[in-house]
Image (tube, grey):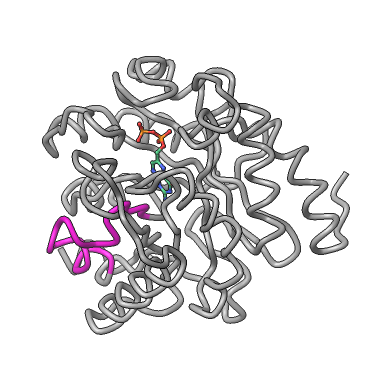
Amino acid sequence: MLRFFDSMQGKLSPKGSALITRHGDIDFERRTALVGVLNVTPDSFSDGGRYLDPENAIARGVKLAEEGADLIDIGGESSRPGARPVSAEEELERVVPVIRGLRRALSVPLSIDTYKARVARVAIEEGVDVVNDISAMRFDPEMVRVIAAAKVPVVLMHMQGTPRTMQERPYYRDVVEEVKGFLQKRIEFALESGVGPEQILVDPGIGFGKELEHNLALLRGLPALASLGRPILVGPSRKTFIGKILGVGPEERLEGSLAAAVAAVLAGANMIRIHDVREARRAIGIADALRYGSVHG
Ligand code: HH2
């Protein structure tokens, strides 16, 4: 495995203000990077079944890139509570044709949304640039070895419990401090295991083992995560907390998602994971102008 990965490389720039990948750099020094969501699943909470067919998924990925996605995040297993767990084989059967198709069609960086080391390894071999692990490398002990060997960036996300159990009465004394402490420990684990500091991004895990009040506290408390010294990714898109505030279903959460994304950017997020990239580009254009004084018209 090590030999296979000899030529693989991806990392943050020395100032930590860009992700350098084999398929181009994602600059977030003076603008927010957008991560387009591409779920190749039958049961994702907002777009399940729409992109299970590889042709549809590839077309969707191309569209996300045209709309301004800086990174396309491909997932082959839903993490919503109650979703059916899938084997690595099944996950690979879903995502590999899509990775291949997108690699032929696009030069945009790709990420794989998986907590399984085998899926991550094969995806990297197929041309994926970043690993997005919702378990922060806890669920599969092999994951950290794959990341260290491949030298690709990894997103370490906070979750309380597992996707199956996470919404059964999540409890925190101080959610911001606890999420920050967890991410700090996962960063230390990664560094001790041979992952470079320049490979690591963090994510507070909106909706993963959190009630409405926890999600709001985290968005409000995002500035506290800056002291971790890593770029921050936030994924509010179409999530239940928006539905709870506005009383709307997943298909009516666009405005709420954009508002939450703008709030996250103004509180310090560097990357936003979102389904509606075209609309997010516009909404976040305003947030970027406010935060960085940058106008990209
Ligand atoms: N949210 C989801 C999945 N992966 N990864 C990161 N880093 N951050 C997130 O907030 C995040 C994530 C859940 O959203 P979605 O992919 O739309 O749904 P599902 O898990 O049902 O496929």
Where residue 261 sits: x, y (%)?
64, 45
Observer-nearest of 202 and 263: 263
Q: Is residue 115 magenta?
A: no
Inspect the magenta stretch and tell me whether residue 134 lies in it.
Answer: yes
Residue located 74% across and 45% down the image: 284
252 in relation to 84, above or below: above
Q: Residue at x 38, y 25 (%)?
A: 45
Q: Position of residue 126 (x, y in %)?
A: 31, 44
Between 89 and 258, the one nearer to me in the picture: 258
Image quarter of the N terminus = bottom left
> Picture coordinates of residue 125 (x, y %)?
28, 50
Please tell me how many numbered marks the rendered image carries: 0
Q: Residue furthest bottom?
A: 192
Residue in the image at 29% along x and 61% along y: 136
Q: Nearer the viewer, residue 244 or 91?
A: 244
| Above or below: residue 112 compared with residue 52 | below
The magenta region covers 131-147
**Residue 144 percent across, percent down from the top left:** 22, 67
Q: Which of the image's four quarters has the C terminus?
A: top right
- In the foreground, 65 or 102: 65
Q: With 237 as the anchor, is 181 left or right in this view?
A: left
